[in-house]
Amino acid sequence: MSLALVGAGREAAVSPKLWRDDFPILGERVHGKPLAYLDNAATTQKPQAVIDALAGYYAHDNANVHRGVHTLSQRATDAYEAARAKVRGFINARQAEEIVFVRGATEAINLVAASFARPRLAPGDEIVLSAMEHHSNIVPWQLACAATGAVLKVVPIGDDGAFLPEAYEALLGPRTKLVAMTHLSNALGTVTPARWIVERAHAAGVPVLLDGAQAISHLAVDVGALGCDFYAFSGHKVFGPTGIGVLYGKAERLRSMVPYQGGGDMIRTVTFEESRFADIPYRFEAGTPNIAGAVGLGAALDYVSAVGMGAIAAHERELVAYATRELERIPGLRIVGTAKEKASIVSFTLEGVHPHDIGTIVDHAGVAIRAGHHCAMPVMQRFGIPGTARASFALYNTLDEVDALVAGVDEARRMFR
Ligand SMILES: *Cc1c(COP(=O)(O)O)cnc(C)c1O
């Protein structure tokens, strides 16, 4: 392919130039080239507003929460609870107490596996998940199964990576105790029919956890409309800090659950004979929480709301369509995951070139992508490949960056020819 053809026939982007200026790291140069950061499914970059919120919290408000009567402690507590209120609004939960702060999606899922699933599982009971889950939505359930004798039932996916509704319905049975399903696959970009998945499960009396680690920054997430019992996501994948995440749980579900960890802040009274646990959500927030992280996450969600999920989704649709079209012109390149319902991610293989070599070669052109199994080894097994190269987009990416990716991948092809 000739570079002159790269970029032919592309439409005007929404306004990524404006958004780019909000993210200082995007001005970095890598190997002397402008950084093209296309690894957003692994983690997203942070707008200045988030960096300022973190610094501002530490510069002006830092103290421990829920304990002191002094002014700073009150300010820190107010900031922490204001962040919880922002999360509630962002995902349209009914009450702030349905928002549990955790370290990330992984911890949120482990919390549900340990505190909700384990006490309810008996030998032969079934947990339904899909063949495109992230390891974080597989291994916690395997641990729960190992402890209880329950078993996993895996909904297969189509050759295009699509969710298969009939296969899902066929797996919902009298022994199903929980459905744990991704909302957006990090390996394929497939968007699942989450609302319908919840409806079908609820019709069978089965609660549902949705893994929203990817969806949260690409789709409008409304837990009220979805109807799910639990929703898990990480702050760092939605332009917030690492080390902070959210478990949303319906209040009645959370109230029915035993604590996940014991310690300070999660109790009402403690004697050596017994401890009485605090109300939700504090019951699940043992120890000093990531206060600054929560504040940063609140700022990130404010930022996303100001940009608007509609504008983000439209811009990313254009990037995915353009990247797909341009990459497919490279001889020997195959896109893995071409489901109709798809967002923000383009996974691909290149004949004769290992994904890691693609990643290294495009890095020299300043392009950051991920190569490997993307913490979803069963997906790779499903397609009979060791891994893929994956470009994943966010609101600040541009068509020029896609051009840099395509040129880099074409370079890799020529080097290995
Ligand atoms: C990243 C990711 C996770 C795990 O998130 P952590 O931040 O590592 O806890 C879970 N599921 C999906 C779909 C992901 O993309």
Image: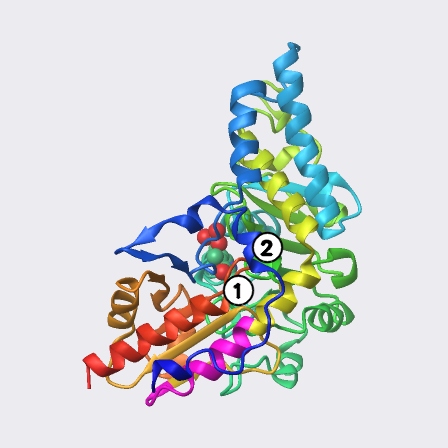
Does the magenta stretch mainly form a helix, a strand or a loop? Answer: helix
**Pointer 2: residues within 10 angstroms few (<14), some, or many (20+)?**
many
Distance in Å between CA atoms under marks 1 and 2:
10 Å
Q: Is label 1 within 8 A of ligand 1 (CB to nearest ligand atom)?
A: no
Q: Residue at x 55, y 60 (%)?
A: 214
Task: Give coordinates of residue 12: x percent, y percent.
Answer: 60, 71
Query: Which mark sits nearer the N-terminus, 1 or 2?
Result: 2
Comparing 114 with 123, the one in front is: 114
Q: Residue at x 49, y 66 (%)?
A: 186
Q: For residue 331: magenta?
A: yes
Residue at which label 2 appears: 117
Which quadrant holds residue 349? Answer: bottom left
Vertical side of 339 occupied by 13: above or below: above
Q: Which residues are magenta?
A: 319-333
Which quadrant holds residue 153? Answer: bottom right
The quadrant of the image that shows the C terminus is bottom left
Q: Residue at x 58, y 73 (%)?
A: 318
Could you say whether the residue bearing mark 1 is in a helix, strand or loop? loop
**What amino acid does circle 2 point to?**
Ala
Residue at which label 1 appears: 150
